[in-house]
Image (tube, rainbow, N blue to C red):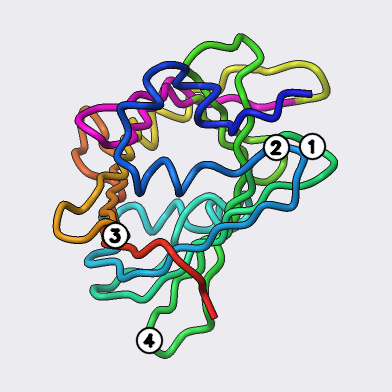
Amino acid sequence: MNATPLIRQALGPEWERLGDVIRRHYAMTPFSDDYVCVRGTMREVWHAPWAALLMPFGRLFGALVPHQGTDVPIEVHYRCRTDDPHLYWDRVFHFPGRTPFHFRSHMEAAPTGGSEVIEYVRFGIGMRLAVSAEEGALVFRDRGYLWRFGRLRIPLPLGLLLGTAYVEERPDPSDPDHFTMKMLLRHRWFGDVFRYSGRFRLGKCE
């Protein structure tokens, strides 16, 4: 039973290169009931007009945020569980005039080990993510999609449609308890498909 935090496992010695607020953010212990919450505002939540065609599939798999907006309040709940080593996410977007939208997923260490994790949504659909520490920031880079079926992990060519993901969480130098984040899905031919960015505070969500 490995009690090292998931992101620390992936980064190894690079963990120490992360900013303090990012390390505190991801210091949760596998096989525990550790819980962290961050609250903030998404400066932008956007998708390309044609990407609306993908939303029914996104809702089915729980993988895409179907609404757009600016200055969108959000909190993100991170949990570990006592019965497995994974990290669970619940991102709650509060779009004006709409029911709060939950984007849920969980992360696992890649079976190959090394500096890679897999983020899963519903029905075993996952994205392989290379993890790195860059100038204090935690960076995730898309390494392809897969479908987990039993013990099999079958590569999926979803990148041909959705593009390639990039995510970063970067310490805010103006406040030791704040960080910024951005997520971008960019297609090599069609440009930006999805993106959102915001600023968060590490602390309790009451």
Residue 84 shows which numbered tag? 1
Who comes first in sequence, dot 4 or dot 1?
1
Q: Is residue 144 magenta?
A: yes
Q: Residues within 10 Å of mark 1 (few under 14, many from 20)?
A: few
Figure check: 176 above or below 122: below
The residue that disc 4 covers is 96
Quarter of the figure with residue 163: top left
Q: What residue do we see at 42% from left, 40% from top?
A: 23
Q: Residues within 10 Å of mark 4 (few under 14, many from 20)?
A: few
* Callouts 3 and 4 close, C-beta under 8 Å: no
* Callouts 4 and 1 close, C-beta under 8 Å: no
Disc 2 marks which amino acid? Answer: Pro
Left or right for 82, reference 48: right
Who comes first in sequence, dot 3 or dot 1?
1
Q: Magenta segment, which residues?
A: 129-148
Foreground label between 3 and 1: 3
The residue that disc 2 covers is 30
Who comes first in sequence, dot 4 or dot 2?
2
Q: Between residues 70 and 139, which one lies in front from this camera angle?
A: 139
Residue 69 locus on image (x, y percent): 28, 73
- Secondary structure at badge 1 equals strand
Figure check: 75 above or below 143: below
The residue that disc 3 covers is 178
Q: What residue do we see at 30% from left, 27% from top?
A: 17
Q: Residues within 10 Å of mark 3 (few under 14, many from 20)?
A: many
In three-dimensional space, the C-alpha distance between marks 3 and 4, rounded to whole angstroms, equals 24 Å
Residue 41 locus on image (x, y percent): 31, 71
- Secondary structure at badge 4 equals loop
Left or right for 5, reference 131: right
Disc 4 marks which amino acid? Answer: Pro
Disc 1 marks which amino acid? Answer: Asp
Residue 15 locus on image (x, y percent): 40, 26
